[in-house]
Amino acid sequence: MRKDEIDTEDFNMMLKDIEERLSRMEEGNEELQASEHEYKSEFERQLSLFGNYQFSSGPPYYLKLDISDMHLRERILGVRGQLSRNEDSTLTFWDKENRSSKAMNLPILEVDSRLLPLLNYLQEDAYPVDFIGECDDDLHMLSVYSIHIVPERKRAQQISAFKFRMKDELLQHFLKYLFSTESMYPVSSRDEGRRAFTSFGELKALFTICRSKYPPNLQSWAENQIKLYESGIFSSTDKQHIVLALSYILNVDWSLTQPDVPELTEVRRILDDEFYGLDAVKQRILEIAAQIRVTHKLPKWGILLCGPAGVGKTSISNSIARILHMKKGYVEFSVVRDDESLSGTSRIYGNAQPGMILNQIYEQGTATLLMHLGEIDKATGGKDRGNPLDVLLPLLDGMGFTDNFIGATIPTTGMFFVATCNDIAAISSPVLDRFYIIEIPQYSRKEKEVIFDRYLFPKFLQQVGASKAEISLDTEARDTLFTQYATAPGVRDLEKYAEKIISNYMLLKELKSVKRHVYNARQLRAVLGPVPSYSSPFAMFPGIAHGAYIHNGHLQAFQIQTIVRPGNGRISFTNIPSPYQEDYCRIAYECVCKLTRYNLTDYDVIISASHPLPLDRANYLGCAVCAALISAIQATPLSASEIFLGGCDLFGNIRLDEISLDPYLRSLSGQYQTLYGPIGISELLYERHQDCHMNIIETPNIAILLELVASRNEGMRGGQF
């Protein structure tokens, strides 16, 4: 503490008054002069002992001392001495540095119960302490507002070199924690001013003083670990493991604090400011916020955000943490290869470490946090290593979590889980059952334009200190950006292009002193480089048909390729991993045989997809497989501008397992000119598609659909479709 921070003005004024009284006294009154000199010495001693401490009066006080035996004439700053116990085991204070130069017993009249473990610790290890406070009007009681450990003399420091001795800095840390609702725990390097307890002496003191702050099972566990360390039967490596385990448990605040959720109108405003669209996501977040505000409890189910890369899943998770005012832990499952990565390794190994779950709790310093589980569909277990996702089941149920390194169950009821994935089919049903699933679709061009204009471009302009009036794109350049470059399902590529455009403008501004620039299509291509090619076009041969599906909100077009060749009537599949989709292909095969009366028992049929299809139960292959088989049997290629939607049954009836056709038209318009599907699909259009130039042909049965295709083929010349 700096001396200029301390308020000792009253004591200095009293000292000045004594000096004035001494100067006015007659020289012959030696007895009165001696008394005044004694009080002057006492004030000087008080200022020298306690003047460097920060003094703040007023409630709440820590304890009250009976100082009536000191027979004071003026109030004091504090007392210095040691805590001890009377014959009846009650705590008392021995004032060892008073003006009488002899120890004086000062009974403790009142004490805050939260302070008792700390006082007992100071008494057992005979710490010299200063009690700083304020006297009452009768000078019979000292209300203590500040407690400090007196720095030990050099000889005492040498004696205590082999034993842990608490410093005043650590004592103040304990006091702040014991009498504050804020967490004392420190560990994250991102939070300045926080410290972790890492030595055995510090950890033992922490547990002794703050034992009541820990759950009962962790109290028993920590007490046992301390006894094991002090038993002396373990090696240095085992002792290091014990200290590390204690550090991971004792440096965490296990108390449960309820999230401070703002008003729902404020929650809605935050979401609208940060995200465009995503109504289903916003609705669920509002429901969670409302539930917490009413019940003061976290929801039982976490959130699983499914969607293609770049649609904002991680950003949504960050926003939920900000809205709930919760710290956030990250566990990235794309790097998880076995369950030990999550649950830690046993201490029987020399290089044992806690798992990723406990490490995130330790890093944040609290068990009340939002746990972000990233890309859980990417977790893969090696041979004989089990499925890493199975470790999450008790964690998601709030039943506690046992880390192999710790060997004790830690509470997890204060955690809220937000997981993300791209492929929901790769996640087991028991894990999915513990989440509220929200599918985030890919962005349409209109949505990308709004996000570009309202969010991305202004964000980067603000970063470089530029205004919207300085940079713009003409109509052709915008069309080029959104049709040729920003074609990914998400907006991550659009974000990179926005930054690239603004960086190029800043270069022009520095080199050529340009104050305003409008980019045309040619200039935009020069800035962004070659148009990215995500897939090469296929040549259309007999046996090829196009289809499409929506999986996890992401629409994907695909090619079905079929080959019919002499054989034994076998059917084989490539890039169709789902047994459900294989069955749908067999149904389409039987349907074609029935409708065309072809005998394929002497032929082998190979059915292949252009890329691996997801493990989905929806039937989106039937129409495309039927069309591809007929094309292969008749040796007639289909048109590259035609696409077949939906599945079929054994009798050729067509159906589409979707509730809306709008995503198909938004994504497929421009690539395809004709869409074949079941009757009634035009009724699934809920949006106006003014820029869509696509023919929608509805038919109830595969037979009619194939006749329509055949009639189109006969009406075209030269086999060009």
Image (cartoon, rainbow, N blue to C red):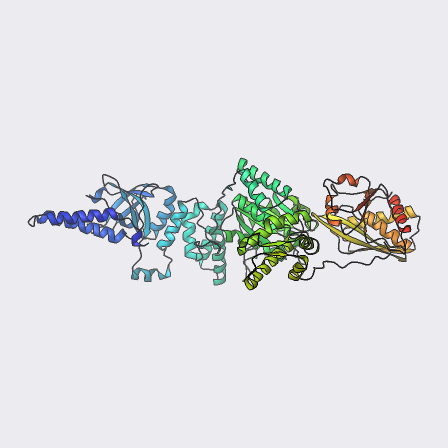
Question: Percent x, y for residue 287?
Answer: 59, 38
Image quadrant holding the C terminus, namely bottom right
Q: Quadrant of residue 159?
A: bottom left
Answer whether residue 312 is visible to the viewer in this image: no
Residue occupying the far bottom of the picture: 511
The residue at 69%/47% (across/down) is 553
Task: Name above or below for residue 262 compared with residue 583.
Answer: above
* 317 horizontally vs 118: left or right: right
* Most distant residue in the top direction: 294
**Quick one: 411 or 571, which is closer to the camera?**
571
Please state if 424 lies on the left or on the right of 87 as rendered. right
Residue at 76% from the left image edge and 43% from the top image edge: 657
Quadrant containing the N terminus in the rendered view: bottom left
**Relative image position of residue 578 (x, y in whole percent):** 76, 51
- Up/down of 647 relative to 195, above or below: above
Q: Position of residue 93 (x, y in %)?
A: 28, 47
Residue 437 in view, yes or no: yes
Q: Residue furthest left?
A: 28
> How many numbered discs sit on the rendered protein?
0
Q: Could you tell whether 137 is left or right of 421 in the image?
A: left
Q: Position of residue 556 (x, y in %)?
A: 74, 51
The one of 357 and 385 positioned closer to us in this rendering: 357
At x 39% / y 44%, what residue is drawn? 179
Q: Nearer the viewer, residue 292 or 412?
A: 292
